[in-house]
């Protein structure tokens, strides 16, 4: 059953940092709420490390498969520019338009 | 006539369609009328397909022309809003995708169309399939047809409620940690999570890629099998799609209903999936069904799965981690909502404002949690460890399936809870998934079938069976066998005991009517 | 932006030891993209080379292009790498509007190829082994155009526009280990390394390798450490150095810039820097920080790549010869002197010379054009010679000279027309009317006219003063606007005198 204690790792600063990485703006009340929620959740789920010893391999896919690929041939699901842009909030001359980018080319 | 049509199983309806006794238009009209009559209370649908009758008319024309049609041609189908469709909006229950039209169909939708199923509409769900109650839908919750004050389960509460309320004979769902099976449990319906990779995920808006699986919702095991036969099979657009040649699930269900398949069947009962935390009525009906199967010659074996106690923890690390990445694409650039801060802003600020406004609290909670689990310095302790737990749970299952043919458990620990009961306690909500999560972590198939009504609240409960990966057919056989025994015992399917949504009269079980005037929308 | 102060290069090398590292991105020329069956071709109309996968539409899923995997293995083998028994994809998570999913599918802890070495030979004859850490598969991003503001650059732009056609184009990223001991040769090593990668992928046929189109992109990591110090200095990463010439210049520039700062007692900031081709400088970009938390995790939508040993051996057997060996062979086949061949190598134009010879030009003509006139024009214009003209057109030009249709002088004019985009050499000849007049009738008419003006010339020739013909030849050439073969004119004048 859920423990009520909170994880000391989760502070408002941590939540603020995470919201930056996740690109979700949060107000102070949301940060406070998430700090509390995450603290409780993390204290409950951190126990995975109890049994995850070094000798146990990680499973990233439930059904092991390998070498799944496709031939290098153009498919039948190519979109027209009109289809590609059909959901765009803003567009111009078949290009997607976004606000000014503050920062650098990646 | 209408009343009869909506209560027919998909199998019976398809027989009438094939014989010409009923037209696809009549069947579709009957369900659209039912939706118009009860959906204001139930709110199973986010969108009703305006083209449904036209599609049905086309099927009738094809049949009249002597075209070869699939067994489910002309049968109406409800589609969970997580699946993208070209002719109806696809929102995944989120404001961030409000009104979004996909330029392509999900593979399962395309296959359903090709098989002649008639899409009735898109069903409600917790936002991006995050939840167990539909209370996290951005468009308001779905109500449980058995008691409109209670949750229909989640995330696929809309699909389960649509089937339970006779708004559709069949529905498509998706199951990441129980989103098909838990709603089936609380609505007295059937839900199947196939083996991971049995059904294509292409066009299913991803929650957690390594856990998501699309599957059928219905009122009978045979109906679910008929729908899985339509949607399953390899899809080159999904790398994780299995290339196996699948036996007919419908045939497996028919074999189960008629044969003596329980004789000698080894049924495992997991020590860790009973006892504390399980409602008395849930446990009671489960034990009765196990006894019933034993009486039919099944061998009951107790199974120890020591790592199941870590399953919920591992799941709530893997799911948020994958979801935090999968949901990054909702950024206001190519599709969906855009919110520009007052006075404009950089693209960064627009993205952050859009995601703030477009995502609900549960989605934000899980994205932030997943971002944390993957972030530098924590990966090994959290995400890495969770993946090791996944290995341990697979080993628990492998050892169990050395000794048994199927594993049985209650489908969920409790009956449907009331709206608002757990909404402020995310961890309590998460622990609700203890019975269904292990199958997703291991990639194995699971089915939930009606298991009667709990004594204390007269609400439906389900029983879950799990089988080794790729042994989906076994679940249909065993599920159909128990279903047949139940129906003998109950004098018909469980749904005959459900309250009448139109008159507010209780079903045959005689519990209090609950319906009047409770629609929150 | 204040101009950075630079230390004299030789002085910098006296005080510091340069340590290099390179990340080269190679765009593969597969028919379709890395994870989607959308066409992979350059120059298509905006946002037309897309499937739901390239746009990251909800519900879309990636599927690996098997040809891209084969190409990557071949490149790994050519780099002398081991091919991983099991390799997998990972998601690199960061938000940027040219990245449709806001994560890039790349490889992290299990790249397809690892631990290799590339041998390069410098002009001095010095042989350097560049150690390769890894080569991994990933996908390219879309293209941003910045609008508003004055420069068309990102700074000051009011909004940006995105074309996702390039999103998902297959890339192989080749990462070197730190290169120690480069010393004075550091800039040349940079240039020669990128040049050899370019020759390698062209020989493999796996990339168009046009640097000006971004088919081949180089990031140069440079740090300095004081002489005698063990510990490596702080490095900068100069991004998008997109021509061979720029690689050399950027390495030299960073060495001089960092040396000045360090000698003044300053510190180097770990940061990305941008190379500006026009000014020949780098400018500070984003500092490396913990914001670069890419949250890599195994891509759940894709499965491991486990190439069969037979496939690896099959690809190994079809590898083209190592560029350095190939250089030695070509030198022999073409009959070049050491100097002539070095001339080509130094210019980084071996691929072009080779292609020009393959297209029918003689080796000497191909060398002469590329390292001569074309290189000269490139230098004047400050661009890469490879961007100016195709090998096919150079071969066609050489053939026109061989056939006597053009004189060298005329051929230079034709080249100018080809560079200006007027068409193939033949088209320029036709359009400008530049061919040598080979019609004797026209020449004789011009000779007659010249002789009429200088009636004493024939006498002088008959008297044995053959050099007197020069005045007539000059007049004829002038009348023909240079489009005559002077030797033929001379022959005709002498015939006339002796008739």
Image: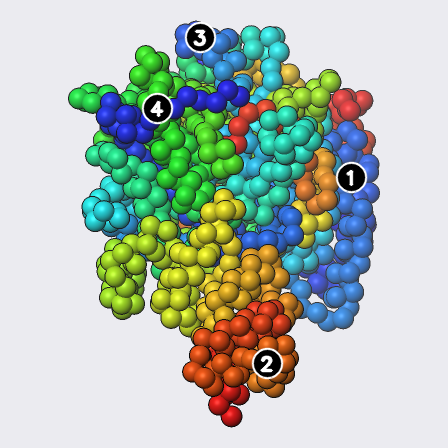
Marked residue chain, label 1: B
* Residue B340 relative to residue B207: left or right: right
Residue designated by label 2: C455
Is C414 left, or right, of B70 in this rendering? left
Task: Determine the secondary structure under disc 4.
Answer: loop
Q: Are marks 3 and 1 in contact (CB under 8 Å)?
A: no
Residue at (82, 38) in percent of width and height: B36
Element on which disc 1 rests:
helix
Mark 2 belongs to chain:
C
Mark 3: which secondary structure? loop
- Mark 3–mark 2 Cα distance, whole angstroms, equals 114 Å
Residue topped by disc 3: A6
Q: What residue did someone put label 1 on?
A: B35
Label number found at residue C7? 4
4 and 3 marks in contact (CB < 8 Å): no
C-alpha separation, residue under disc 4 versus residue under disc 3? 56 Å
The Cα atoms of the two marked residues, 4 and 2, are separated by: 69 Å
Mark 2: few/some/many CA within 10 Å (<14, 14-19, 20+): few
Q: CA distance from mark 1 to mark 2?
A: 111 Å
How many numbered badges does the structure rendering display?
4
- Of the pair B489 and A5, the residue shown nearer to us: A5
Classify mark 1: residues with Cα within 10 Å, few (<14), some (14-19) or many (20+): many
């Amino acid at each position: 059953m859920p423990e009520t204690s909170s994880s000391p790792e989760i502070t408002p600063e941590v939540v603020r940092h995470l919201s930056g990485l996740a690109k979700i703006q949060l107000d102070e009340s949301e940060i406070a709420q998430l700090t509390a929620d995450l603290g409780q959740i993390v204290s409950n789920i951190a126990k995975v490390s109890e049994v995850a010893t070094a000798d146990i391999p990680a499973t990233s896919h439930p059904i092991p498969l390998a070498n799944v690929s496709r031939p290098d041939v153009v498919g039948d699901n190519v979109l027209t520019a009109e289809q590609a842009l059909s959901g765009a909030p803003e567009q111009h001359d078949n290009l997607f338009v976004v606000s000014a980018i503050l920062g650098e080319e990646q | 006539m209408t009343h009869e049509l909506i209560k027919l199983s998909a199998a019976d309806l398809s027989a009438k369609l094939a014989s010409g006794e009923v037209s696809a238009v009549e069947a579709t009209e009957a369900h659209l009328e039912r939706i118009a009559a009860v959906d204001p209370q139930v709110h199973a649908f986010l969108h009703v397909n305006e083209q449904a009758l036209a599609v049905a008319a086309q099927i009738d024309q094809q049949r009249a022309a002597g075209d070869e049609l699939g067994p489910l041609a002309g049968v109406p189908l409800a589609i969970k809003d997580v699946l993208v469709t070209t002719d109806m909006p696809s929102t995944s229950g989120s404001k961030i995708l409000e009104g979004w039209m996909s330029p392509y169909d999900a593979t399962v939708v395309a296959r359903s169309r090709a098989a002649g199923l008639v899409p009735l509409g898109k069903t409600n769900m917790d936002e991006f399939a995050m939840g167990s109650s539909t209370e996290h839908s951005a468009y308001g919750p779905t109500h449980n047809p058995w008691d409109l004050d209670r949750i229909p389960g989640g995330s696929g509460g809309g699909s389960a409620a649509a089937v339970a309320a006779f708004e559709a004979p069949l529905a498509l769902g998706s199951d990441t940690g129980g989103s098909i099976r838990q709603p089936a449990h609380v609505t007295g319906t059937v839900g199947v999570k196939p083996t991971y990779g049995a059904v294509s995920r292409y066009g299913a808006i991803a929650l957690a890629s390594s856990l998501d699986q699309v599957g059928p919702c219905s009122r009978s095991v045979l109906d679910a099998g008929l729908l899985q036969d339509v949607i399953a099979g390899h899809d080159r657009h999904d790398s994780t799609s299995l290339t196996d040649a699948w036996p007919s699930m419908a045939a497996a269900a028919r074999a189960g209903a008629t044969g003596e398949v329980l004789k000698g069947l080894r049924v495992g009962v997991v020590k860790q999936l009973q006892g504390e935390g399980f409602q008395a009525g849930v446990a009671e009906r489960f034990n009765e069904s196990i006894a019933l199967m034993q009486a039919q010659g099944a061998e009951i074996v107790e199974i120890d799965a020591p790592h199941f106690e870590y399953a919920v923890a591992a799941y709530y690390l893997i799911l948020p981690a994958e979801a935090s990445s999968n949901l990054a694409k909702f950024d206001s650039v190519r599709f969906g909502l855009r919110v520009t801060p007052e006075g404009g802003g950089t693209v960064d600020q627009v993205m952050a404002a859009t995601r703030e406004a477009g995502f609900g609290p549960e989605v934000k909670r899980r994205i932030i949690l997943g971002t944390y689990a993957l972030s530098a310095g924590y990966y090994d302790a959290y995400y890495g460890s969770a993946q090791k737990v996944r290995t341990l749970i697979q080993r628990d299952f492998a050892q169990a399936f050395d000794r048994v043919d199927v594993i049985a458990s209650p489908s969920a620990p409790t009956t449907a809870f009331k709206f608002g009961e757990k909404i402020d306690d995310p961890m309590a909500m998460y622990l609700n998934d203890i019975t269904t999560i292990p199958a997703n972590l291991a990639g194995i198939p699971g089915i939930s079938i009606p298991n009667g009504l709990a004594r204390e609240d007269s609400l439906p409960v389900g029983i879950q069976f799990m089988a080794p990966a790729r042994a989906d057919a076994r679940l249909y056989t065993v599920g159909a066998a128990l279903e047949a025994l139940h129906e003998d015992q109950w004098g018909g399917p469980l749904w005959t005991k459900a309250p009448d949504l139109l008159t507010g009269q209780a079903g045959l079980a005689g519990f209090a009517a609950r319906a009047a005037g409770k629609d929150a929308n | 932006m204040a101009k950075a102060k630079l230390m004299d290069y030789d002085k910098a090398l006296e005080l510091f030891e340069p340590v290099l590292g390179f990340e080269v991105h190679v765009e593969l020329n597969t028919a379709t993209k890395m994870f989607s069956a959308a066409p992979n071709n350059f120059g298509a109309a905006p946002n037309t080379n897309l499937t739901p996968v390239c746009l990251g539409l909800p519900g879309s899923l990636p599927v690996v292009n098997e040809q891209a995997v084969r190409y990557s293995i071949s490149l790994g083998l050519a780099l002398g790498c081991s091919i991983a028994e099991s390799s997998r994809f990972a998601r690199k998570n960061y938000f940027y509007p040219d990245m449709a999913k806001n994560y890039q599918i790349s490889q992290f802890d299990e790249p397809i190829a690892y631990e290799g070495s590339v041998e390069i030979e410098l002009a001095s004859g010095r042989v350097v082994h560049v150690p390769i850490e890894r080569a991994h598969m990933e996908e390219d991003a879309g293209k941003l155009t910045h609008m508003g503001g004055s420069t068309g650059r990102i700074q000051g732009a009011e909004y940006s526009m995105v074309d996702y056609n390039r999103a998902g184009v297959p890339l192989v990223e080749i990462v070197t280990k730190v290169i120690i001991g480069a010393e004075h040769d550091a800039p040349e090593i940079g240039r020669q390394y990128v040049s050899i990668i370019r020759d390698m992928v062209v020989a493999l046929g796996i990339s168009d390798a046009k640097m000006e189109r971004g088919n081949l992109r180089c990031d140069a990591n440079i740090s300095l450490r004081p002489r005698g110090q063990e510990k490596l200095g702080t490095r900068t990463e100069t991004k998008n150095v997109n021509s061979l010439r720029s690689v050399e210049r950027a390495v030299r520039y960073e060495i001089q810039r960092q040396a000045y700062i360090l000698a003044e007692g300053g510190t180097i900031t770990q940061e990305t820097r941008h190379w500006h081709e026009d000014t020949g400088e780098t400018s500070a970009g984003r500092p490396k920080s913990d914001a670069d938390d890419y949250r890599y995790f195994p891509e759940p939508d894709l499965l491991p790549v486990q190439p069969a040993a037979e496939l690896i051996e099959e690809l190994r057997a079809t590898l083209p010869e190592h560029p350095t060996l190939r250089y030695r062979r070509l030198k022999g086949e073409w009959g070049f002197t050491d100097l002539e061949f070095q001339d080509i190598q130094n210019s980084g134009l071996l691929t072009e010379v080779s292609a020009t010879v393959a297209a029918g030009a003689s080796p000497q003509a191909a060398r002469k054009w590329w390292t001569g006139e074309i290189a000269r024009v490139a230098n004047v214009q400050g661009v890469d010679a490879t961007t100016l003209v195709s090998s096919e057109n150079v071969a066609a030009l050489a053939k026109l000279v061989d056939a006597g249709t053009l004189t060298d002088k005329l051929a230079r004019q034709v080249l100018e027309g080809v560079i200006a985009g007027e068409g193939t050499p033949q088209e320029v000849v036709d359009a400008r009317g530049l061919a040598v007049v080979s019609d004797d009738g026209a020449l004789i008419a011009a000779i007659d006219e010249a002789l009429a003006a200088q009636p004493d010339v024939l006498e002088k020739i008959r008297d044995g003063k053959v050099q007197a013909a020069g005045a007539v030849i000059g007049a004829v050439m002038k009348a023909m606007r240079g489009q005559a073969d002077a030797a033929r004119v001379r022959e005709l004048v002498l015939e006339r005198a002796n008739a």
